[in-house]
Amino acid sequence: MLESYEVNSSTLALLALNEHTTKVVEKEKEYYISKPSIKIMDDSCKYFGSSYLGREEGSRNLIGSTYKVPIIVEETKRMIFIPTSSPKFSTCDWIAFHHIYKYEEKENGLYILFDNGKQISINMSYYSFENQILRASKLENTIRNRIS
């Protein structure tokens, strides 16, 4: 089990296993990190020059949303991550918006198919995830318009 990890362009998801352990799903590999998912997000934001709280505040200001806001971990690569619940909960997973190919609700959860063919299941309704996708799209569009 690793003790440190920063999200990168290969990161597909951070899956909170419990309050102390996160499973990282990358395009080619998977890791177990002995940190909660929110700590990995905070460390990753700091690695790229801000803090999680700074990124959260920025997202709130950009899209006008106050709950479960997507986070831009790194601007130039448009690394935006979607929380599956309130980040205050130890069960919050983080999904890389830019790698989502499609998603669908099935009997035992929401299935996300990534652009490389990997698939995961999360405990979230289709409607809630759709709202998160819309927030992340709005955030990405706002950033794109400000950069151009």
Image (spheres, rainbow, N blue to C red):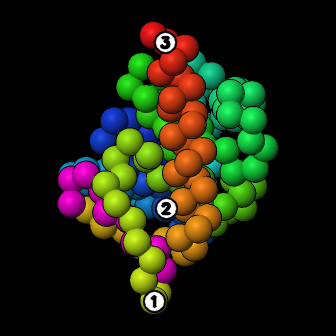
The residue beneath circle 1 is 107
In this view, the mark in front (3 or 2): 3
Q: Quadrant of residue 53?
A: top right
Tell me the magenta residue range. 109-117
Q: Is residue 77 above or below residue 122?
A: above
Q: 118 or 66: which is nearer to us?
A: 66
Give how far apart the Cα atoms at labels 3 and 2 are.
31 Å
Q: Amino acid at mark 2?
A: Leu
Mark 2, residues whose alpha carbon is within 10 Å: few (<14), some, or many (≥20)?
Answer: many
x and y percent of residue 74 in the render?
A: 48, 26
Predominant secondary structure, magenta span: strand
* Front residue (pair 36, 83): 83
Q: Are marks 1 and 3 in contact (CB under 8 Å)?
A: no
**Is 105 located above or below residue 78 in the figure?**
below
The disc at residue 15 is 2
Q: What residue is at 43 percent from the left and 54 percent from the top?
A: 13
Find disc 3 in the rendering and name its residue.
147
Asked if the stretch drawn in magenta spans residue 145, the answer is: no
Q: Amino acid at mark 1?
A: Glu
Q: Earlier in the sequence, mark 3 or mark 2?
A: 2
Q: From the image, which quarter does the N terminus lie in?
A: bottom left
Residue 47: % across, % down: 52, 25
Element at badge 1?
loop
Q: Which residue sits at x=51%, y=18%?
A: 145
